[in-house]
Image (cartoon, grey):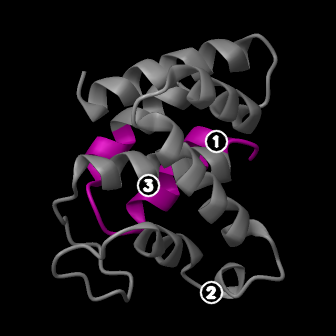
């Protein structure tokens, strides 16, 4: 099973847990531990960055472009990225797509409208917006 298939299966399992009353973050941590494969390391990495981006005492949380900085600092900078909020369509690796999506789910799951909030954040950063959008819709629709 490739990484994108793992992600799809993971999100389906998380969604079931959420529908049964579990919080998104708890469901993601539980399912990643149970699932194995590549997902646990990626969920862990996205969770650390989510915490850093949302904890008010960190430098990252104070950045005006916090999501862009968070995504870029989780992995490799995208090829050709100017890091100034460019909206260019940049090709991302599967790992980057999964990490970015996991971060957005963690960060926006508890907002009033998580789909709307996560899609707006997705549109405001570099990378493969369309691939992330598919996963965000899978999680929040």
Residue 88 sits above or below residue 119 on the image: below
Residue 134 sits above or below residue 132 on the image: above
Which SS type dominates the magenta stretch?
A: helix
Residue carrying label 3: 100
Residue carrying label 1: 114
In this image, 91 relative to 130: left or right? left
Query: Could you tell me how far apart the alpha carbons at marks 1 and 3 are, in whole angstroms?
Result: 15 Å
Which residues make up the magenta segment? 109-133
Q: x, y (%) of residue 103?
A: 55, 53
Local SS, label 2: loop
Residue in the image at 65% along x and 60% along y: 48
Residue in the image at 46% along x and 67% along y: 74
Q: Residues within 10 Å of mark 2 (few under 14, many from 20)?
A: few
Local SS, label 3: helix
Corner quadrant of residue 4: top left
Q: Please give the label number shown on residue 141.
A: none
Corner quadrant of residue 83: bottom left
Local SS, label 1: helix
Query: Could you tell me how far apart the alpha carbons at marks 2 and 1 are, in whole angstroms?
Result: 21 Å
Q: x, y (%) of residue 100?
A: 44, 54
Residue in the image at 53% along x and 24% along y: 141
Q: Nearer the viewer, residue 20 or 137?
A: 20
Quarter of the image for the N terminus: give it. Answer: top left
Residue carrying label 2: 63
Q: Tell me, yes or no, whether the two marked residues, 3 and 2, touch with CB atoms within 8 Å.
A: no
Q: Residues within 10 Å of mark 1 (few under 14, many from 20)?
A: many
Residue 96 sits above or below residue 139 on the image: below
Q: Is residue 128 magenta?
A: yes
């Amino acid at each position: 099973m490739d990484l994108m298939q793992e992600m799809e299966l993971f999100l389906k399992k998380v969604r079931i847990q959420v529908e049964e009353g579990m919080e998104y973050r708890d469901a993601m941590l539980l399912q990643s531990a149970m699932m194995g494969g590549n997902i646990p390391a990626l969920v862990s990495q996205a969770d650390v960055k989510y915490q850093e981006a949302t904890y008010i005492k960190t430098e990252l949380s104070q950045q005006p472009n916090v999501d862009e900085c968070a995504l870029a600092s989780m992995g490799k900078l995208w090829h050709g990225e100017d890091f100034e909020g460019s909206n260019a369509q940049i090709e991302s690796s599967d790992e980057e797509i999964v990490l970015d999506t996991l971060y957005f789910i963690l960060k926006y799951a508890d907002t009033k409208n998580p789909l709307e909030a996560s899609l707006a954040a997705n549109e405001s950063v570099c990378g493969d917006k369309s691939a992330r959008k598919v996963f965000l819709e899978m999680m929040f629709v």
